[in-house]
Image (cartoon, grey):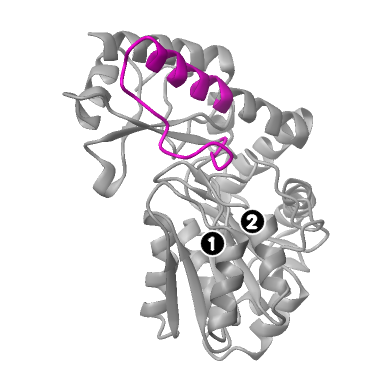
Amino acid sequence: MTDFGKFFLPGPTEVKPEILATMTRPMISHRGAEIETMMARIDERLQNVFRTSHPVFTVTSSATGLMEGGVRNTVKSKLLCLVNGAFSKRFHKAAVNSGIACDKLEVEVGHAHTPEMLADALRRDHYDAVTVVHSETSTGVLNPIRELTAAAHAHGDVVMIIDTVSSMAAAPIECGAWDLDYVLTGSQKALALPPGLAFCTANDRVMERAKASRMRGLYFDLVEIHSSWTRHQSPNTPAVSLLYALDAQLEVLMREGMEARWSRHAAMAQRTWAWVDQQRSAGLDIRVLAPEGYRSPAVTCISAPAGRTGPQIVSAMKARGFVITPGYGDLKDTMIRIGHMGEHTVAELDVLLDALGEVLAS
């Protein structure tokens, strides 16, 4: 166990002790007035976080469940999956395992998709839905979801299914103003909550498709979830203890304000990138994997210097009391990842970076 301010995984992220403490409260009826009052408060605040007037649904699940729910409720005939890392591949696997016709538009790891790439793909085939990961946690790349959504909508009846798991509450996301169709996230990243809850918003286009879908299933049936949402309820038994934590943490977000939270995350990200540049200028051969202009404010993937591996660096940092992680999948040996999101501050991050500098110099 680490002291607060030393746990920098890109998920699950550190949770404040006072938020964890709320989960020790006694159980209440999940069908009573008390939980409905709490959920009414949660529902309104989540709309503020997502910046939308559409409902935001809370589900007891990992975010992967709502990735699968997104494709099952939304795709009419054929799906295009924008793949630029391990988690965007998950959308494709969810579609294949659900029997949905789908193709991949893949770019090199460490790169983003552009609106021009998407427009070209939509001209070449008849896709009615597109998946994309906003902040690809495996690489630290940020896809331009506003521009990609505009490119998709320019081709008619095409909806965007967007994973914002590591960007929601870290990067500016305007679900309403940007006309985003289906947006999902999880509790364990920049929202700074324990794992186990997932959230999504779906606009009218998506809900109309869900009503007509024959493959929306049971647990992630958006029509049923929406019906329960109108009563501040859930179709199934929710994780009540996690809802206590959510209620308390949303109060923290409302006090900080979304713009201020975005700015704090941007400051942490920029501090990390500047530190990498400083180390390189001093002769250390490291770099940020994601190109400038396409970098996530929540997680940075940094190359390991020659002669060192990701796991070696992670172990050395653990000996100093800090938790970071190697690169994901094929990048495990050549990269490390720092999650600068949630309730962390630039001051806490500076302590981590000082320790990392000492490790890399040793």
Mark 2 nearby-residue class (10 Å; few <14, some 14–19, many ≥20): many
Whether the residues at callouts 2 and 1 have beta carbons within 8 Å, the answer is: yes
Range shown magenta: 269-297
User: How far is disc 2 from disc 1 in space, using C-alphas?
Assistant: 8 Å
Sequence-first tag of 2 and 1: 1
Quadrant where the C terminus is found in the figure:
top left
Q: Looking at the image, which is closer to me, 107 or 192? A: 107
Q: Can residue 218 be seen in this snapshot?
A: no
Amino acid carrying label 1: it is Val
Q: Position of residue 318 (x, y in %)?
A: 28, 20
Q: Position of residue 246 (x, y in %)?
A: 63, 43
Q: Can residue 278 be seen in this snapshot?
A: yes
Mark 1 nearby-residue class (10 Å; few <14, some 14–19, many ≥20): many
Residue in the picture at 40% in, 63% down: 90
As drawn, 11 above or below 203: above
Residue in the picture at 61% in, 71% down: 119
Query: Pointer 2: what residue?
Result: 145
Quadrant where the N terminus is found in the figure:
top left
Residue in the picture at 70% in, 48% down: 173
As drawn, 122 above or below 254: below
Q: Position of residue 354 (x, y in %)?
A: 41, 9
Q: Is residue 276 toward the left or the right of residue 76 in the image?
A: left
Query: Pointer 1: what residue?
Result: 132
